[in-house]
Amino acid sequence: MKIFFSESKPEYKTYTFNYGIYCIKEDNKELTTIYEKGFLPYSGNTELQAEIFYLARSLRVDLDRFVDSSENRRVNRKIEPLNIKVEFLSKNDVLSDDPGFHPFCEQYVSARIGEAMTPSRLQYILDLTTGTHVFRFTRDDHVVGYVLAVVSLEIVHYWFSFFDLELMRSHSLGKWMMWSVIQWAKSANKKSVYLGTAYGEKALYKVRDHKGLSFFDGSSWNEDMDLLKSWCKTDQDRDATDRFKLAEDANLYIQNIFP
């Protein structure tokens, strides 16, 4: 893996000169290390030849601390009578053997995501070697969802999900699928499940729903969910200054990083 920095917008009045921090993956054997360092896969530029990751406030489930929450149990009780089957499949096998995969994903993208996920971007994501497997969810041989995942010996990243639009109206299908992947990872003796970024109030459902969480705070994995909730609630209104400069006690901020 190779790490590089890209200069971002300066804020000279506070001496804040931010940089985007990126990682180039050179081999899938590096996936665990890349995720543990706080990076997530970047797919915003479909012309990129290298597989790029960006450093961000990533959220993960530490499976040695994970137990079902009351919300997990509530959602599962409602969906359990549907007898949904979960399959763990190689991405390449799904792409070659499941003719319904592309149309299902494209229909979901068109209805729920829109212009942010063009057909060319979806194809670019599927072509990346970072995405290794697909979880397929079926009910009476009818597909109700797919999850494109990144899986290594130690970790799983719940990357992109696609749902049955009708079933979503009556059941918390997305929540249940995420929980199912976490359950699969725990049973497969994985170390962590990564759930993407945790910014803004829209991300709080991930924090509320699951136990055993930690987030990457820029220097380490932090288990303080009250702190994460407060950050998420103030993300939108915060200026560009970094959190070190915003800290009430900058000396304590440093001490917490280097105890």
Image (cartoon, helix red, strand yellow):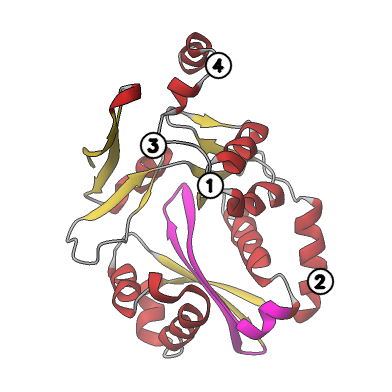
What residue does disc 4 label? 248
Query: For mark 3, what is the residue?
Result: 37
Label 2 close to label 3 by CB (< 8 Å) = no
Q: Nearer the viewer, mark 3 or mark 1?
A: 1
Q: Is residue 66 left or right of residue 113?
A: right
- Badge 2 or badge 4: first in the primary sequence: 2
Q: Secondary structure at mark 4?
A: loop
Q: Report which residue position mark 2 lands on.
A: 78
Element at badge 1? loop
Q: Quadrant of the N terminus?
A: top left
Residue 129, placed above or below residue 219:
below
Q: Quickly name the residue at label 1.
A: 198
Q: Earlier in the sequence, mark 3 or mark 1?
A: 3
Name the residue type under label 2: Lys
Image x and y of residue 76, in percent: 77, 66
* Residue in the picture at 32% in, 55% down: 42
- Amino acid, disc 1: Ala
Looking at the rendering, which quadrant does residue 12 occupy?
top left
